[in-house]
Image (cartoon, grey):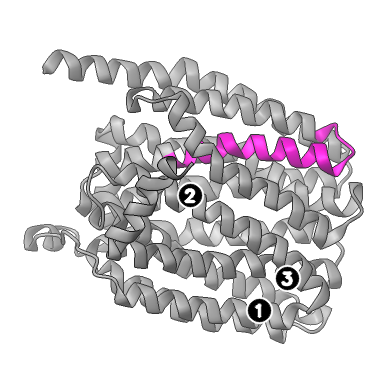
Amino acid sequence: MTGKLQPYIQLIKGNHNYRRLWIAQLISNFGDWFGILAVYAIIQKYSGSELLLGLIIVVKMLSLASFSPIAGYITDRFNRRQLMIWCDIIRGVIVLGFILITSESLLWLAYVLIAVQMAFSAIFEPAKTSSIPNVTTPQELVNANILSAASWSIIFTSGMAVGGFATEWLGTDLVFLINGISYVGSSWFVYRAEIPQKMMSKEEKQKTRNPLHGIKDGMKYLKTNKSVLRPTLAKGTFTMCIGALVYMLIIVAEDVLMMGSIGLGILYAARGIGTGIGPVIGRRVFRSEDLWVKGMGFFMMIAGATYFVVSQSDTLFWMGLFVMIAHMASGSNWVMSTVLVQRRAPDQYRGRVFSLEWLLFTLAQSVSVTIAALILEYDLLTLRETMAVFSVLLVVSGIFWLFKIAPAEARHHAEQSAAV
C-alpha cells in the first residue's frame, strides 16, 4: 500500500508550490461542502418547496455559467495567483451574509449571495486548474490531478458528513462562520505559493484588449482544435443527467430515507468516496491516455446503470453503495478529461478553455436540475420514476459518446501515428 501511495507522497513532499496550492484546495473545499448543507437547510426551513430547493442549485450553476466566459478571459490576461487570493477573501466575506437570513421574507438573499459567491468561484476554479500544469512537471501532472480529485472526495466526504451533523446540532450560523474562515485560510496558502504563468504577448494583449474579442478568440481556438474540444465536452455531457440525479438525492434523504441532513450527508459521503477512488481504478483499467476519451463513454453508461439501481432502492446501504460506484465513474471522467485538456491546451488559452468547459458544465447541470425540479413540483412523475428516466438518459448519452465522439478521437491518434 505504501508503495502505491509513494508517488503522491513524493509529490506533496518534493513540490512545495503544488503542496501549497493543494492545501488551499483542501481548506476551501472543506468550507464549501461543510456549508452547502446549511444553505439547503435554510431553504427547506423557510419554504419546504422542491422547486425553490432546486432553484438554489440552478442559480448557483447559472451564475457560474454567466461569468465563465469573462472569467476565462480574466484568468488568461491577469496574474492567476493574485486572482485566486482575492476571490478567496471576497467569498469569505460573502458567505457570512447567509447569517442575515432569519425569516421567509429574507429568503431571496440566499439566491443573491449564492450568485455572487459563484461569480468569484467562476474565476477561481479555472485559475486553479490552469495553474496545476505550471507547478508540476509533465510526469507529475496525472498524479497531481488524481491527488486533487482524491483530496476533493475526502474533503467532500468529511465536509458533507460533518456538515450534516453540524447543521443539525450547531445551527447554520456557526457553519457559515466556519465556511468564511476557511476561505481566508485558503488565500494564505495561495499567497505563499509561487505559480509561474506564461503571460500573453503584447501583440496578444492588444489583439484581445476587448473582452468580447478575447472570449471569441478562445471559442475559435476550441472550434479549430477538436483534440482539445472533445475532452472539454466530457463533463458537460456527463452532467446533463447526473446533475439532476445528485439534486434528487437531497429529496431522497428527506422523503425516502426520512433522515434529513444526516441522511444526505451519508449519501454525499458515498459520492465523495467514489469520486476519490474512481480515478485511481479508472487509470488502471484504461492505462493508455489514447483510450481515455473512449473510456468516458463507458463511464457514462456505468453511472447511469448504477443510479437506476439507486432509484429502485429503499435502504441506505444499497443507495450508498451504488451512489459510490456511479461517482467512481464520474470521478474517472472528471480527472481524465481535465488532464487531457491541461496537456493539449497552451497556457495562454488554458484559462478560456477551462472556463468554457465550466460554461457547458454549469448550463447542462442547470437545465437538468430545472427539468427534474419542475417534474417533481407539478407531480408529472414520482421521485423514483424521475430518477429512472435520467438514469436511462445517461446510459443513452454514453452509447452516443462511444459511437460519435470516440471514433473521432481514434482517427486523431491514427493521424498522429501516421505523421510520426
Magenta region, main secondary structure? helix
- What's the mark number on residue 149? 2
- Residue where numbered disc 3 is placed: 38
- For the point 7% across and 63% down, the residue is 202
Regarding mark 1 in the picture, which secondary structure is present there? helix
Nearest to the observer: residue 323 or residue 395:
323
Q: Amino acid at mark 1?
A: Phe
Residues at marks 1 and 3, CA–CA distance in whole angstroms: 8 Å
Q: Is residue 129 above or below residue 124?
A: above
- For the point 61% across and 24% down, the residue is 301
Look at the numbered discs 1 and 3 and tell me whether their residues touch, using CB distance below 8 Å: yes
Residues at marks 2 and 3, CA–CA distance in whole angstroms: 24 Å
Look at the numbered discs 2 and 3 and tell me whether their residues touch, using CB distance below 8 Å: no
Pick whichever of labels 1 and 3 is earlier in the sequence: 3
Pick whichever of labels 1 and 2 is earlier in the sequence: 2
Q: Which residues are magenta?
A: 311-335
75 with respect to 305 (left or right): left
- For the point 64% across and 56% down, the residue is 157
- Residue where numbered disc 1 is placed: 176
Q: Position of residue 49 (x, y in %)?
A: 84, 60
Look at the numbered discs 1 and 2 and tell me whether their residues touch, using CB distance below 8 Å: no
Instruction: Single out the mark in the foreground, 1 or 2.
Output: 2
Q: Position of residue 408 (x, y in %)?
A: 35, 19
Q: Amino acid at mark 3?
A: Ala
Regarding mark 2 in the picture, which secondary structure is present there? helix
